[in-house]
Amino acid sequence: MDIALTNSLLRIASANSQAETAQAVEVTVLKKALNLQASAAATLLEAIPQPPSVNLGPLGTQLDTFA
């Protein structure tokens, strides 16, 4: 086997391994960022005050539809 070919194959394999590792790290960072955003969104939604309930009798409790 040619030594230059072997060295070339080893460099390619090493570069591929490094690329896979970098991609795995990027995916992990993305997942953590999405989790932080989801947590912040949930906190904001919980901070919204509930509107007071209004009881105006039958107003708004019936829906008339026409075909």
Image (cartoon, rainbow, N blue to C red):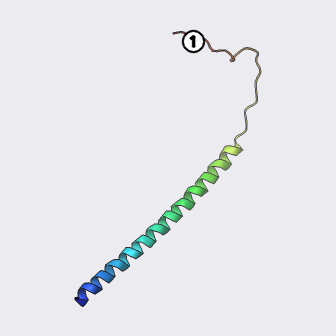
What residue is rendered at 33% in x and 83% in y?
10
CA neighbours of label 1 inside 10 A, class few (<14), some (14 to 19), many (20+): few
Nearest the camera: 50 or 38? 38
19 with respect to 31 (left or right): left
Q: Residue furthest bottom?
A: 3
Nearest the camera: 11 or 33? 11
Looking at the image, residue 55 lies above or below residue 44? above
What residue is rendered at 53% in x and 64% in y?
29
Looking at the image, residue 56 lies above or below residue 38? above
What residue is rendered at 77% in x and 21% in y?
55
Amino acid at pointer 1: Thr
Residue that label 1 marks: 65
Image coordinates for residue 47, horizontal then vertical, percent? 71, 45
Image coordinates for residue 23, horizontal then vertical, percent? 44, 67
Write down the quadrant of residue 1 in the picture: bottom left
Nearest the camera: 26 or 11? 11
How many numbered circles are shown?
Answer: 1
63 with respect to 24 (left or right): right
What residue is rendered at 28% in x and 83% in y?
8
Image coordinates for residue 44, horizontal then vertical, percent? 66, 47
Looking at the image, residue 64 lies above or below residue 53? above
Image coordinates for residue 26, horizontal then vertical, percent? 48, 66
Q: Residue furthest left?
A: 2
Mark 1: secondary structure: loop
